[in-house]
Image (cartoon, helix red, strand yellow):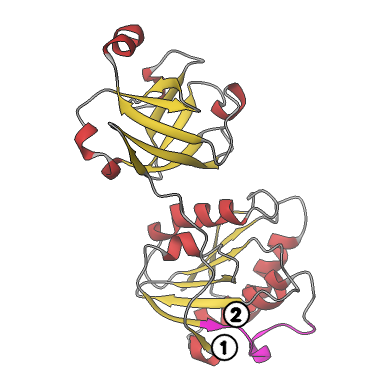
């Protein structure tokens, strides 16, 4: 039994996600299909890339990950299958696969051009059903990626905002807002190991917002806090609320983590 995951911006109120599953199961009835999410904001390639990167490695080896956030569908963007040491990734060549692939050893990249493995006729607006779903199904039956089209040397990669030193602290930015309004940054604990036993503060737009704590309820209800979330990244949250709404946070906002001053330590205790 092969696992095929789906990450899309199709939502669940229309027939798009369900039709993709039908296209897969019609070719490979034994496929186990797992929805990572269909709630990526429409056309937000970067959010789709982050969702895939945060989830893909929790699946067993040989899982096929299909990610479709595809505002360029029907245009000149390429369609890809990427084979790594552990997984197969299928999706448009617009960067949606790139965050996940940054942590993988890539063995091959192939452009999807062999119409034998597509549904026909191919819609100009729904390659999720007509190209990516059937390709994933054929891969799950053991078809080799080299049968699907010519080999490529690289793919489109979205720039990742790498954390940078900022005096005594670490500077990064918000890369994703989840449905709870938590603002997830590109900063991981290993970016500042020397702070592990030091109380820290988080600054947004150069103003102190909150302390770095171990869990959401370490602060009073309605108060902001920074925690290392389940994705491994530092996130800004509000205990019982939405940090994005309460503090007008958005993707791209700069954040800085610094050792707490004596004043902030005493005021937050």
Query: Which residue: 53% across, 78% down?
Result: 81
Q: Is residue 143 visible?
A: no
Q: Is the residue 19 above or below the residue 29 in the image?
A: above
Q: Is the residue 157 above or below the residue 117 in the image?
A: above
In reply to whether residue 205 is colored magenta, the answer given is no
In the structure shown, which secondary structural element does the residue marked by tag 1 occupy? loop
Q: Is the residue 200 above or below the residue 228 in the image?
A: above
Disc 2 and disc 1 in contact, CB within 8 angstroms: yes
Query: Residue 135's mark?
Result: 2
Magenta residues span: 110-121
Quarter of the image where one finds residue 227: top left
The x, y position of residue 213, in whole percent, is 33, 25
Q: How far apart are the alpha carbons under marks 2 and 1?
A: 8 Å
The x, y position of residue 76, in whole percent, is 71, 76
Quarter of the image where one finds residue 24: bottom right
The x, y position of residue 259, in whole percent, is 28, 25
In the structure shown, which secondary structural element does the residue marked by tag 2 occupy? helix
Q: Earlier in the sequence, mark 2 or mark 1?
A: 2
Query: Which residue: 27% across, 31% down?
Result: 168
Q: Is residue 198 left or right of residue 109?
A: left
Q: Is residue 142 visible?
A: yes
Q: Which residue is mark 1?
A: 148
């Amino acid at each position: 039994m092969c696992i095929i995951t789906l990450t899309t911006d199709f939502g669940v109120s229309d027939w798009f996600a369900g039709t993709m599953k039908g296209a897969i199961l019609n070719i490979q009835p034994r496929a186990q299909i797992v929805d990572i999410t269909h709630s990526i904001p429409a056309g937000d390639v970067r959010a789709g890339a982050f969702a895939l990167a945060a989830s893909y490695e929790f699946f067993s080896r040989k899982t096929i990950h299909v990610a479709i956030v595809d505002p360029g569908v029907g245009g000149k963007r390429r369609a890809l299958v990427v084979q790594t040491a552990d997984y197969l990734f299928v999706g448009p060549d617009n960067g949606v696969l790139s965050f996940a692939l940054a942590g993988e050893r890539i063995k091959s990249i192939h452009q999807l051009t062999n119409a034998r493995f597509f549904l026909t006729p191919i819609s100009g607006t729904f390659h999720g059903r007509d190209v990516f779903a059937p390709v994933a199904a054929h891969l799950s039956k053991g078809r080799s990626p080299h049968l699907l089209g010519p080999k490529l040397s690289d793919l489109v990669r979205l720039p990742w905002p790498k954390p940078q030193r900022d005096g005594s602290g670490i500077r990064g930015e918000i890369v994703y807002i989840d449905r709870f309004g938590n603002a997830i940054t590109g900063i991981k604990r290993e970016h500042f190991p020397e702070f592990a036993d030091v109380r820290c503060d988080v600054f947004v737009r150069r103003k102190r917002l909150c302390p770095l704590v171990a869990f959401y309820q370490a602060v009073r209800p309605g108060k902001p806090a920074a925690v290392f979330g389940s994705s491994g990244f530092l996130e800004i949250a509000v205990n019982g609320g939405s940090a994005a709404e309460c503090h007008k946070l958005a993707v791209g906002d700069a954040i800085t983590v610094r050792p707490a001053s004596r004043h902030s330590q005493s005021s937050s205790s």
